[in-house]
Amino acid sequence: MSNHIIDLQGIDKSFGDTRVLENFSLYIRENEFITLLGPSGCGKTTILRIIGGFEQPDAGKVLYKGADIASVPPNKRNFNTVFQKYSLFPHMNIFENVAFGLRIKKMPEVEIRKKVSRALEIVNLPGFEERYPDSLSGGQQQRVAIARAIVCEPEVLLFDEPLGALDLKLRQGMQHELKKLREALGITFVYVTHDQEEALTMSDTIVVMSNGEIQQIGTPVDIYNEPKNRFVARFIGESNIVEGVMHEDFHVRFAEHEFTCVDGGFEKEEKVDVVIRPEDIKIVPKGEGMLSGVVKSVYFKGVHYEMQVQTGETDWMVQSTLMEEAGKEVGISIFPNDIHIMKKTRV
Amino acid sequence: MKVKKSLYMVALFPFLIWLILLVVVPLMLIGYYGFTNAAGIFSFDNFHQFFQPDYLRVLWRSLYLSLVATVFCLLAGYPVAMILAGNTFRKKTLLVVLLIAPMWMNFLLRTYAWLTLLEGNGVFNTILQAMGLPKQSFLGNTNAVVFGMVYNFLPYMIFPIYNSISKIPKNILEAARDLGGGNATCFFRIILPLSVPGIISGITMVFVPGVTTFVISQFLGSGKVTLIGDIIEQQFMHAGNWGFGSAISIVVMVVVVVCMWLVNRFSDDSGVMMP
């Protein structure tokens, strides 16, 4: 409990007849960059809005350092939010936008000036004080929104898909800036996104959600390498998911072949899902691999080629920097470390 | 490109005709009548005739009463517009219909209805008498005229303001709250400044018809409260002095334009409000 800054316990929330969250619990540690990741409608934004105070949970507790704050309005919480696009005050210049929170705290003017220009420096927009939001690009506006939030020195910064409206290049730049920013500020970031790459790049902890339920919590590496179920495996990156049977620990059969793997702890002859990342499948000359098949199609994707290889009944997606001709007969190899076994998800 | 341009012209044609026949030509005629004397020669006689204390007093009264009515409309209309724009109020459609329904009736009819309600032997006085209270004379004073203006023009204040308030993105209000703003801060620093365009058009749509009305003053003022609109109407319809009537119209037009320019200037300066 000691280093939990926020504790959500048994949260229920419905909008009309739609139940978004049911008995949802999650804790957030101090100084953690935690990302709620999931498809739209999975309840991630609702959780953020409950933490921010914009929504009241129907049931359950929102604890901040152990004290229940479920009924405290947003303006009385020491959290600040960076919203999706268009949340700057259009009738105020950048200085007044950033100074807004400080003026409410009735800070002396000299101090406000100092803090605003410091905040604008942090987000790399010095000298923008006199400009108005509509003269700024999307990326600049979002950085002003971040400056406006951090200038209040909150203990928790909440981000509601802040980069969603930006183009790819800008988004990647901002991802690095956000990560640096968190290291510089040393405060807790709670980040909501549906972009798995964004989540993998920035987070300390990722919470993968679907239909209001947590599918998996873990570090980006864990989530990518050890997905707990089909949903996580499909949502995070590309993957081949095939059905298999676990004969015993470290021995699995799939695609009409016996493989050695590194997973154990299943029942004898238990049916399982097997996940293999496309970049972990090696194409070898015909006859040399564990399986043999035919290249069905080849697409050039920039960094790598993406190939469809059929072995018996199974189609494999393979990513490799080396191209094989479509129609060529090849072998494929999969190493034990790259075979990841998941328990069958109850449907 | 050429085809497109000529198509535009064709589409614009009916409007241009309308504009020329009903706006440009009448304005020119008013200018002509205003600046010529009975003999049809250019002169300022009509304006000399107008700039006398009696007429100026009427002009002043018109501006003043219309201003009072505008202030009442703003004070009464702004909260209604805010309630309409808020998402907490569930009977929104009903309220909108109630506000708009009177506007489906003829303006004259609506004003005439108040006459029957308020006159000496009208509905209100009958009720008062039945309750054993003395009769009141509601009509024939400036209060009645202002009341008539507020009643008739209130929706024209509410809807532009409602429009501009409901256009404020919810995000922005949540951001204000998020940064520590309470209800007062949200209102004075976000909602009010961002609804200024609505306030301006509301003021315009109440003040301008208020200055020039003559029906309200004739019906509810019982002819005892003379407004500038009454004088213009007299000159055209009864005295047959089109030149003088036109000159007054021109003066009123100039005064109204100056008023609106002042309002706009004031609002530009106060766009960013300091706490």
Image (cartoon, coloured by chain):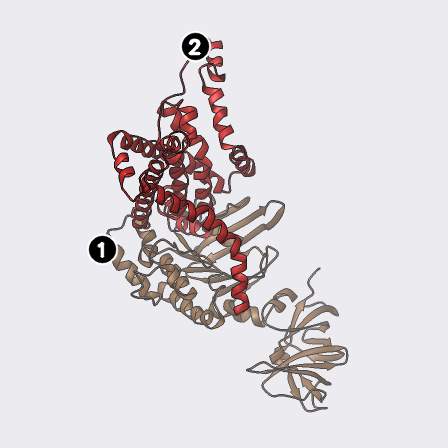
Instruction: Give the x, y percent position of residue A121.
Output: 31, 66
* View extreme (left): residue: A110
Number of marks drawn: 2
Mark 1 touching mark 2, by CB under 8 A? Answer: no
Q: Is residue A211 visible?
A: yes
The local crowd at label 1, few if under 14, some if 14 to 19, many if 20 or more residues have their Cα within 10 Å, is: few
Q: Secondary structure at mark 2?
A: loop
Q: Determine the chain carrying the residue at label 2.
A: B
Residue on which disc 1 sits = A110
From this view, report whether residue A176 is shown above or below residue B265: below
Left or right: where A256 falls relative to A282 = right
What is the display colour for chain B? red
Figure quadrant of the C terminus of chain A? bottom right
Q: Are marks 1 and 2 on the same chain?
A: no
What is the display colour for chain A? brown
**Kind of residue indicated by mark 2:** Leu
The Cα–Cα distance between marks 1 and 2, rounded to whole angstroms, is: 66 Å
Which quadrant of the figure has residue B148?
top left
Instruction: Give the x, y percent position of residue A45.
Output: 52, 55
Most foreground residue, B146 or A118: B146
Residue on which disc 2 sits = B133
Which quadrant of the figure has residue B214?
top left
Q: Residue at x 63, y 64 (%)?
A: A231
Q: Residue at x 38, y 28 (%)?
A: B146
The local crowd at label 2, few if under 14, some if 14 to 19, many if 20 or more residues have their Cα within 10 Å, is: few
